[in-house]
Amino acid sequence: MKIKNLLLAVLLIVLSLPVVQAQFGVRLGANLANQTIESGGESLDTKMKFGFGAGVFYQYMVNDNFTIQPELNFMQMGTKFDLDFLGTTIESTTTFNYLQIPILAKYGFGDMDALNFYVQAGPYVALGLGKVKTKSCVGDDCETEDTDYGDGEDGPKSLDFGLQLGAGVNITKNISVDARYGLGLANLTSEEDSTYKNSSIFISLGYKF
């Protein structure tokens, strides 16, 4: 909770800065999500799943090249895996929905009003929304199960946090293409000798007003 409170405090400070030195924008993209799942020293061979991501951002310009950018995003995370058991294919896909708040430091190279390359990095905190959906298929027989967020034992923890690192291109003064890698640091389970962490590659198109 200390990390969550710290990020929220930083966000409030940034939002209190003069609007004349900032730009608001929207972002829409695709999220290639995965999860690291380990139990008893064994790792599950998981695969990326496609998810949706969208949100708004506030870009505060510290100087001509350096900006601070807090965001408020809806992000779909999760994972999938499959295995063959006695000639039958077993597949499982899990989807987590999050309200995510990254706070990114960005450095741009070149003229900010023209074609411009930038790098970015910063922490994020996320809160689970709704229920976790798991679709399981044994051969052609499929069923979907909804699970409430919990304390890590009766359901996955709702609070996630981690780091984001990425780069992008400002195509024009208003339009940008952005790619970032998200590394989850929170263990979403409290089960002994188990690890359950998020990761993702988010590719998006942004528009600044």
Image: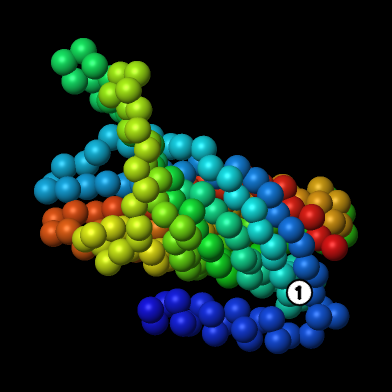
Instruction: Give the percent coordinates (x, y) of residue 80.
Output: 37, 36
Instruction: Give the percent coordinates (x, y) of residue 38.
Output: 22, 47
**Of the pair 80 and 112, the residue shown nearer to us:** 80
Q: Is residue 194 left or right of residue 34?
A: left
Instruction: Give the percent coordinates (x, y) of residue 47.
Output: 38, 35
**Of the pair 198 and 62, the residue shown nearer to us:** 198
Asked if residue 109 can be seen in this view, the reply is no
Label 1 amino acid?
Answer: Met
Q: Is residue 33 left or right of residue 119?
A: left
Q: Is residue 34 above or below residue 26?
A: above
Residue 203 quadrant: top right
Instruction: Give the percent coordinates (x, y) of residue 145.
Output: 34, 43
Q: Is residue 22 left or right of residue 87?
A: right
Label 1 belongs to which residue?
61
Q: Is residue 5 left or right of residue 64?
A: left
User: How many residues crowd around disc 1 within 10 Å: few (fewer than 14), some, or many (20 or more)?
Assistant: some
Residue shown at 13% from the left, 47% from the top: 41
Residue shown at 53% from the left, 57% from the top: 165
Asked if residue 148 can be seen in this view, the reply is yes
Residue shown at 38% from the left, 79% from the top: 1
**Of the pair 78 and 45, the residue shown nearer to us:** 78
- Name the element at disc 1: strand
